[in-house]
């Protein structure tokens, strides 16, 4: 694993790998699970299943949508993609012209902090590859992954769940996605470092404080350090998702 990049070539892929490719420059990455035979299972904005943020970030959601151009691919044209948002694509369609990267698991704390950009690695360990592939295939064929939300349930959350079986259980505003934490952590660090202006005008001091707050927020929000995460079997997860909550009827 490189300090600056997790870029790999297709020949080094193994079934069960968590892969990703950057979209919209390096603003947002789309994640999935490679299951072998040149196929990737990933979580997208299923029709009628997305949850918007009401901000410019909604535009980023389009970057993980299943592209119409995939209909021209003889492999993906044969896939039956249900509207629950978990789909199977060939590797080329998943990459959509981007570069292939592999998400790294069980990295050291030093390397985790050094990788300043979230959404590339985690301190948590991965389950065996056959278990990872089983979860991804099960969610594709039987369960789905609920409603897509860029902050609390996105493509990275899906891939991390497949790799670890861990899920945020308190329905908080942020899932286990490292890139979501990065989006929120940057402004948070700036806000928390602002009071320093009352006691100092040292730009370097404020910068160091902001960077420290950002790194600490990323470290504490990693799935291996959070208290609102627990291991959930994929069969239990799909059973939860299948429960239909009746609509509230106004009195």
Image (cartoon, helix red, strand yellow):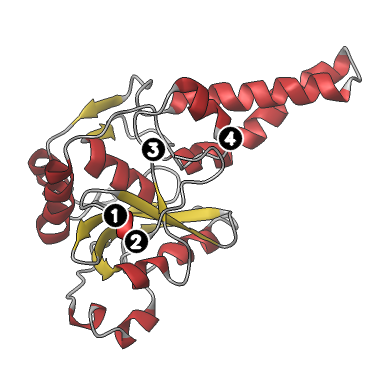
Question: In the structure shown, which secondary structural element does the residue marked by tag 1 occupy?
Answer: loop
> Mark on residue 13?
1
Q: Nearer the viewer, residue 103 or 220?
A: 103
Residue 61 placement (x, y as % from top left): 46, 60
Mark 1 or 4, nearer chain start = 1
The residue identified by callout 3 is: 175
Residue 32 placement (x, y as % from top left): 32, 55
Say if 161 sits above or below 202 in the image: below
- Between circles 3 and 2, the one closer to the viewer is 2
C-alpha separation, residue under disc 3 versus residue under disc 2: 29 Å
Quarter of the view holding residue 174: top left
Q: Residues within 10 Å of mark 1 (few under 14, many from 20)?
A: some
C-alpha separation, residue under disc 1 versus residue under disc 2: 6 Å
Q: Residue furthest front?
A: 11
- Between circles 4 and 2, the one closer to the viewer is 2
> Mark on residue 155?
none
Mark 1 or 3, nearer chain start = 1
The residue identified by callout 2 is: 10
> Mark on residue 116?
4
Image-based side of 226 in relation to 79, left or right: right
């Amino acid at each position: 694993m490189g300090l600056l990049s997790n870029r790999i070539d297709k020949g080094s892929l193994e079934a069960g790998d968590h892969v990703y490719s950057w979209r919209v420059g390096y603003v947002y990455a789309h994640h999935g699970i490679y299951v072998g035979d040149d196929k990737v299972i990933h979580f997208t904005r299923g029709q009628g299943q997305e949850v918007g943020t009401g901000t410019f970030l909604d535009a980023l959601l389009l970057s993980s949508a299943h592209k119409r151009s995939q209909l021209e691919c003889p492999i993906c044209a044969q896939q039956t993609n249900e509207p629950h948002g978990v789909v199977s694509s060939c590797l080329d369609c998943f990459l959509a012209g981007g570069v292939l990267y592999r998400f790294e698991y069980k990295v050291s704390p030093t390397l985790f902090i050094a990788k300043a950009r979230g959404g590339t690695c985690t301190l948590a360990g991965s389950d065996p590859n056959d278990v990872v592939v089983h979860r991804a295939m099960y969610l594709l064929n039987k369960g789905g992954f609920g409603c897509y939300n860029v902050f609390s349930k996105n493509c990275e959350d899906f891939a991390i769940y497949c790799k670890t079986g861990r899920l945020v259980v308190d329905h908080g505003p942020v899932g286990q996605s490292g890139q979501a934490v990065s989006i929120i952590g940057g402004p948070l660090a700036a806000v928390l470092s602002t009071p320093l202006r009352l006691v100092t005008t040292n730009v370097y001091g404020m910068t160091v404080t902001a960077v420290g707050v950002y790194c600490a927020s990323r470290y504490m929000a990693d799935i291996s350090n959070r208290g609102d995460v627990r291991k959930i079997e994929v069969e239990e997860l799909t059973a939860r998702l299948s429960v239909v909550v009746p609509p509230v009827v106004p009195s």
